[in-house]
Amino acid sequence: MARRPLPSPSNPSTARPPVARPFARPARPRARQRGGALVESTLGLGMVLLLGLACIEAMHWQLMRQLAYVALTEAARAGAVGNAKPQAIAQAFETAMLPRHAAADGPHHARERLRAAWQRTERRTGLPPWRIAIVAPAAEAYDDFSQPGLRNDRLRTIRNDYQAEQHGTYRARGWPGGRGPRSGLTVFEANVLRLRLRYVVEPLVPLVRPILRTAATLGGPDACAGQALAAGALPLQLELAMDMQSHPVQWPAEEATTRVRLAPQACDP
């Protein structure tokens, strides 16, 4: 009886056909790896959310900064043509801030919403929502350059016209470079109105408040900014100088308003 040839790789006719085997069952994941994708997704989405909120706050702060600068410019213009009167400066600033709460019901309601927002900021933070300090002309400038007879109320007044002639007179008087002995300014510099604004911006996202309070504990060079941060708000400080177009007047203290001060204090606000 003839034997069947043994299968050999060199003889394809005798090779056995491959046997199909079922797929091996994948190994079950370890218990500590369960939910890993969910945790990673949660962390990733949380970071994206925080980044989006930070962008919103940055845009809001920049918007308020631009609006406050425009309002400060209008306030300086009102002061430049109005003898640096605090009431005119305060009214011009408030009017220029109305677009922040503008609506179809008219400027009267916008003013009401603006004042309500400022009252809410003062109630939440314990700080004035905004304050303007008249940095210049300072009292020393009035000591050097005030001239009598320019007003009937006898308030100290710096003459705004004929500045070149005044400068020549002061130089002939022996003042080096025409600079006053008390202020160290020329009559041209004494006729410059300089305003400093401090504005408190409340964050839109409540989550930002504790972050700002934590930042206040780190300290900083500006004590006023630290007060705003400790109250959970963003500090905003702007300064603007503009040439006077009228005689600068040194107004008495009773002419100052709660929002416009005649001289910078240690911390405004």
Image (cartoon, rainbow, N blue to C red):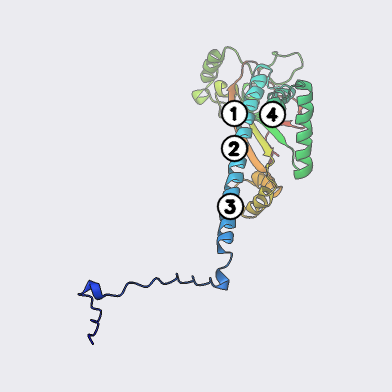
User: Sequence-wise, which precedes: disc 1 or disc 3?
Assistant: 3
Q: Secondary structure at mark 3?
A: helix
What's the distance in space between the residues labelled 2 and 1, CA to CA?
A: 23 Å
The residue under label 4 is which amino acid type?
A: Arg
Picture coordinates of residue 155, whole percent (x, y):
73, 20
Res. 45 mark: 3
Which residue matches tag 4? 100
Cα–Cα gap, marks 3 and 4: 32 Å
Which mark, by number, is residue 66? none
Q: Label 2: few (<14), some or many (≥20) within 10 Å?
A: few
Label drawn at residue 59: 2
Q: x, y percentage for residue 136?
A: 63, 28
Give the position of the N terminus as an image quadrant: bottom left
Q: Nearer the viewer, mark 3 or mark 2?
A: 3
Q: Is residue 214 left or right of residue 253?
A: left
* Residue occupying the far left of the picture: 10
